Amino acid sequence: MKETLSCVPIKQEWDIVGARQAGRNFASNLGFGSVDQARIATAISELARNIYLYAGKGEVIFEEVQGQTPVGLKIIAADEGAGIQDISKVMEDGYSTSGGLGAGLPGVKRLMDEFDIVSSEKGTVIKIIKWLR
């Protein structure tokens, strides 16, 4: 079962902070501890920043998901930008097109329990889940 908790539009740099705080609040309400809340907030910051930098606008959607036993927080970061040319390349540690450290998406994948990315010339959708343990 999925329940959409909220959707945060990303249109300006300040929206990154709003998405991060919303994710931390949802994680807290679902019972995640402070360390996992920080992991989730860090992942959201990276995804929202990527939307702002590379697509200009998009949204971050929060859903509560139920597995066999655990509860999870699913985060969907979606945009209608130009897409990612080579997904395998951006998933390599150290690769960056912005001059950063190149730890962004690989770092998000390490912080979360599930990670999925779909990208085309019509945009990018990244879905991540953190399960409550």
Image: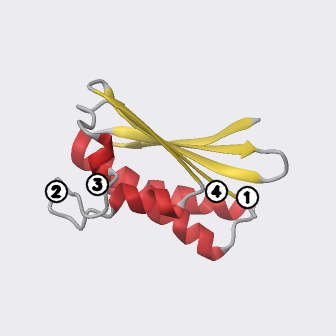
Q: Earlier in the sequence, mark 3 or mark 4?
A: 3
Q: Residues within 10 Å of mark 3 (few under 14, many from 20)?
A: some
Residue at image position (69%, 45%) is 64
User: Which amino acid, mark 4?
Assistant: Phe
Q: Nearer the viewer, residue 42 or 10?
A: 42
Mark 1 or mark 2: name the one nearer the start of the chain. Answer: 1
Residue at 23% from the left image edge and 36% from the top image edge: 85
Q: Residue furthest bottom?
A: 35
Q: Give the x, y percent position of residue 58.
A: 36, 37
Amino acid tagged 3: Glu
Question: Residue at label 2?
Answer: 98
**For residue 42, what is the image quadrant?**
bottom left
Q: From the viewer's perspective, is residue 75 above or below residue 31?
A: above
Disc 2 crowd, CA 10 A, few/some/many (<14, 14-19, 20+): few
> What is the residue that sits farthest to the right in this orientation?
69
Q: For the point 26% across and 25% down, which residue is it?
A: 121
> Horizontal placement of 54 versus 133: left or right?
left
- Answer with left or right where residue 90 lies relative to residue 74: left
Q: Can residue 56 be seen in this snapshot? A: no
Which quadrant would the N terminus be assigned to in this image? top right
> Gap in Å between the C-alphas at discs 2 and 4?
30 Å
Q: Which residue is mark 3?
A: 13
Query: In this orientation, does residue 121 appear?
Result: yes
Determine crowd level at label 4: few under 14, some 14-19, many 20+ residues with C-alpha closer than 10 A.
some
Q: CA distance from mark 3 to mark 4?
A: 21 Å
The kind of residue tagged 2 is: Ser
Give the alpha-carbon distance from disc 1 to disc 3, as whole Å. Answer: 27 Å
Residue, disc 4: 26
Ranked by sequence position, the earlier of labels 1 and 3 is: 3
Q: Residue furthest top?
A: 122
Mark 1 touching mark 4, by CB under 8 A? yes
